[in-house]
Amino acid sequence: MNSLKIKILGLITVIVVVIVSTAAFINFEQQKRMVTSVTERDIQVLTDTIKTAIASAMRSGHSTEVSDIFARIKSQKFIKGLRIVDETGKILNSADKAEIGKMTRSKGFPALKAGNPPPLLLSENAMVFYGVTAIHNGRQCYGCHDSTHQILGMLEIEMSMDNMNSFINEGKKIAFISTVIIILLIMISISVFLVLYVDRPIRHLISSMQTVEKGDFESRTVINSSREMNLLSRSYNRMIDRLKEMMETTIEHERELARAEEKLVRHHESQLMNRKLAEQLIEIEHLNTALGERIEEIEESNYKIADLAGELEDKNTNLEKAVAKLSTLYKVGLGINSTMELDRIFDLIVKTTMETLHAQIGYIILHDSDRNVLEIKTLLGLENISHRGHMLPMTSSSISAWVISNRKPLLIPDIGKFPGFDRFSVLGYARKTLVSAPITTKDEIIGTITVVNKHDDSVFNNEDMELLSTIATQAGIAINNAKLYDEQQKTYLNTIHALVSAIEASDSYTRGHSERVTRYSLQLGRKLDLPHERMKVIERAAILHDIGKIGIELTLLHKKGLLTSDDIRNLQQHPTIGMKILEPIEFLNDVRLCIGQHHERYDGQGYPNNLSKGQLLLESRILAITDAFDAMTSDRPYRNALTLDAAIKELYDNAGGQFDPDLVPHFVELLESGAFPGQATGSFPTSPSRVPFPAA
């Protein structure tokens, strides 16, 4: 706000606004007076015209025409009132019929008699004009009026000038807009003038001054916008030249003074330095002697540091190898603890060992001492060879045979230097370098683990052999644990199977039922290509599916008559009883579920829990079909066995209800193909009985 340009522009703005606004106001007032004058003249003419028309009508004796004249004039929008008033103020005639006979407060009549006509403009805001004129008595009026009355009445007219008011407002609006435009044009012109002829030259001078203030005396200005500015710029340039000369002279004097002072100081310092130099020379000689001794010590330290660095590098390398070994052993240990399936354990051990030792091929071979052959259990790195179950002879050129016979690991850095072993394996690959270690359980060598060839074409060393030997020891422990676990499972299963056999032995009708159901279920599982783990579940569930009948009374199981509703409910408890019997055996959890579901129906109408479709295990749906089929084709105390065709028809008739409709066709295909031993020789009953069968 302290800018000269803003101050000048502000002052000019105020002056222009005042001048233009005053001129516009005066012009508007002049127009208003002119409109008012014209209107007053028009209303006077209109009043005289109406008075003449009334006088003519009265002279012709047509007094009724006065009302018609008033009505025609009142129809004009700008006429607000039209009436004739006598000297007492009574309204004799009016354009508004309701006013006739009433008294008016108008003072026009007394004013006219006194020679002072009232003002024409009654309301300035509403722009209403008032016209009044006297109706004089004449000779032509003596027939109707007394000749002594000079004035018969007074004609009053009120006229609104709303249309003129809008004209005035429009003029006011145009005057305002014109005033604003004129002010803006004037301000723009003045602003352009100030920028071009005042502000820009001044800014140029200020910029040049700032440059000089920074020490640049070469700055010059040339301003030709006006004669005064040109004179100012030339004076400024001369001032800069004078200032430059003065600065150069001052600087030169200061330099000479500084050189003189410097010479004095140097002379004094040189004397002091000479004395110090002599003292420092003596100290340097002592330091040189000490420095020679330190250099010898540093060289000896460097040698020691180099030796320590080499030892540290070796230790780091060994530490990395040790960490890798521990990591491998840890992974192997986790794998052993995570499963009891030997095939998965072998795959994990070989894969982890190959990753740690960077081997291309790895395998585990077990020794069959009864047949004196080697069986490949796991072979990784040769994808095109079907290795599992492959038998190899115990030959003198076999690496595994040598390790088993000598009961110690074998390291071959270069197969070319061991002529006793074949360079090419019987499996069809070339061996360059390998290491093999024996797998031992209870001081008995049961096989070997071997890794062959490295990815980087380096050779195996003693550390690799030590790691492989440790892994082989863990593999032996895993094999022993798996065997113990398998033996424990077999003990459990044999015990329970013995109980099932005892139940079936007490009933000639159900003897061999579990074995047949197992055979049917396994064949159907193989046709459906179930994995090995699920095949185990279905095998065990088929054998043990009726274990719950231990809790059912023998008299009920052997009952030949019709079963009561209580008998049926008791019999339907055997899946639940079977689940409770197997509950303590953790590894039979899926088997328990399958046994508990083998009498459930596909449509959810089975027992004991009314489960349906997606809630049922695939194994339990298989078992439901095979159990029912064996029950249909076996003689029971309460009915004879069905024929094979009749049993198949029953399977199809109940598909989607009792049985899974997707599994029934697969089982029937097995029956029709003669897949079950004994079927072709007529082992299935041929009785035509179609008696409905109950749950087995």
Image: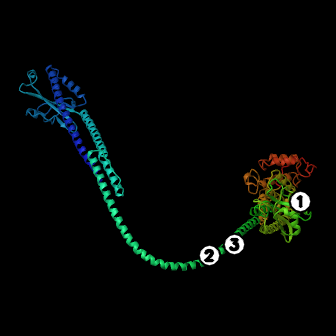
Kindly report the distance in space between the C-alpha atoms of the residues bearing marks 3 and 2. 20 Å
Tell whether label 1 touches label 3 (CB within 8 Å): no
Kindly report the distance in space between the C-alpha atoms of the residues bearing marks 3 and 1. 47 Å
Residue at (24, 35) in percent of width and height: 168
Q: Earlier in the sequence, mark 2 or mark 1?
A: 2
Q: Which mark is residue 392?
A: 1
Q: Which residue is mark 2?
A: 298
Q: Earlier in the sequence, mark 3 or mark 1?
A: 3
The part of the image, by quadrant, that contains residue 293 is bottom right
User: What is the secondary structure assignment of the residue under circle 2?
Assistant: helix
- Amino acid residing under circle 3: Glu
Q: Nearer the viewer, mark 3 or mark 1?
A: 3
Residue at (53, 78) in percent of width and height: 284
Tell whether label 2 touches label 3 (CB within 8 Å): no
User: What is the secondary structure assignment of the residue under circle 3?
Assistant: helix
Specify the quadrant that holds the C terminus: bottom right
Q: Nearer the viewer, mark 3 or mark 2?
A: 2
